Image: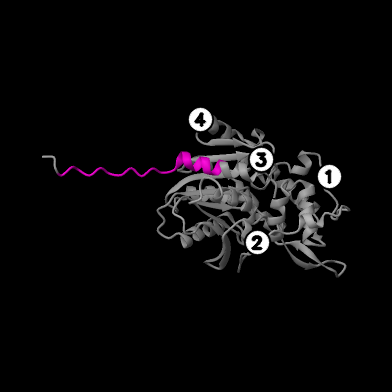
Amino acid sequence: MDFRQHIFKARNIPLPPLESTTDDTEQLTPLEWPGYFESQQAIAVGDTTFNVYCSGLANTGPIFVLHHGAGHSGLTYGLVARHILNGSTPNCTIVAPDARDHGSTTGANQQLLSLERLVDDFVGIIQAMFPNNTRDLVLVGHSMGGAVVAHAAASRRLGNIAGLILIDIVEGSAMDSLSSIPTFINARPKSFATIESAIRWHVESGAIQSTESARLSVPTLIVPTTKEDGSAGWTWRTRLLPTEEYWHGWYSGLSKTFISAPTAKLLVLAGTDRLDKELLIAQMQGKFQLELLPAAGHTIQEDLPNRVGDAIVSFWKRNQRVNIPIRQPDSHLP
């Protein structure tokens, strides 16, 4: 879900037709997750079994926990994860869960998406996977996921948090855009004839600029359905309109929560126009780091995965906890 005057309206781009006349199906075939993550874990927390994409579980370096936005899935970070592991931080661990009512996560009460429940889920996943953790934790969240990780950090329920990273989410612009989101949702295709046509729609609309990332993540955003004419097709996995009652709670007070979180902070945006007054003042006071990637759309992690991966790793390296060994007294001295 795009919470900044929506990319189509902002760029004056009309929604493309559901089916394209170009014959590029072979270039839009779905990609599988094993090319981007090492394993797929089922983590039980309360009434839900969360699907979690993982890499480097046996490693001893920092743990990067990546939370997606509303309507997306953990595979939105697939290209980011691959870039980080193939780069300068091969000893890290990367965890990217599907939130409740998203992706391959299953369980009861899936449509209950209050901020409190989402934070409980997120904290529960980390505690279940890394009990008694002593390693650096870096929490990363895109859009709605940014609100989840910010409140998780502020709650102090997780230890050893070395950093908090929010991707393209600002309270002011999010709150201003809430009234227009139903219009955007209703303007999307209700269904797709094939998975490839769903991928094509995301690429041609500009929702995801990277075809590779779209081929990886979009198949997890749709499920089989029977269309109105009785033919088989695909429709949205997560029904966003029924979650409208939670939208205000996701973003209200986010700027204050982010600024006050007791850890180093990074905000990754596609443009400075997204900063609200509270964040502008805090940024001038040096309370968080700002990274601008103006070539990207709302899903920055999919449009510019290498730049986002580099930003995550550089941010951790600047803020990692340094364990200084205690010097033992020399027994030979009197």
Q: Are marks 4 and 2 in contact (CB under 8 Å)?
A: no
Task: State the separation of the CA atoms marked 2 and 1.
Answer: 28 Å
Looking at the rendered structure, the kind of residue marked 1 is: Pro
Q: Which residues are magenta?
A: 311-331
Residue, disc 1: 14
- Please identify, in this view, whether the residue under mark 4 or under mark 2 is nearer the observer: 2
Q: From what the image shows, is residue 239 above or below residue 294?
A: below
Residue, disc 2: 103
- The quarter of the picture where residue 232 lies is bottom right
Q: Position of residue 155 (x, y in %)?
A: 47, 50
Q: Earlier in the sequence, mark 2 or mark 1?
A: 1
Looking at the rendered structure, the kind of residue marked 4 is: Gln
- The quarter of the picture where residue 170 lies is top right
Residue placed at 64% from the left, 64% from the top?
104
Looking at the rendered structure, the kind of residue marked 2 is: Gly
Q: Secondary structure at mark 4?
A: loop
Callout 4 crowding tier (Cα within 10 Å): few <14, some 14–19, many ≥20 = few
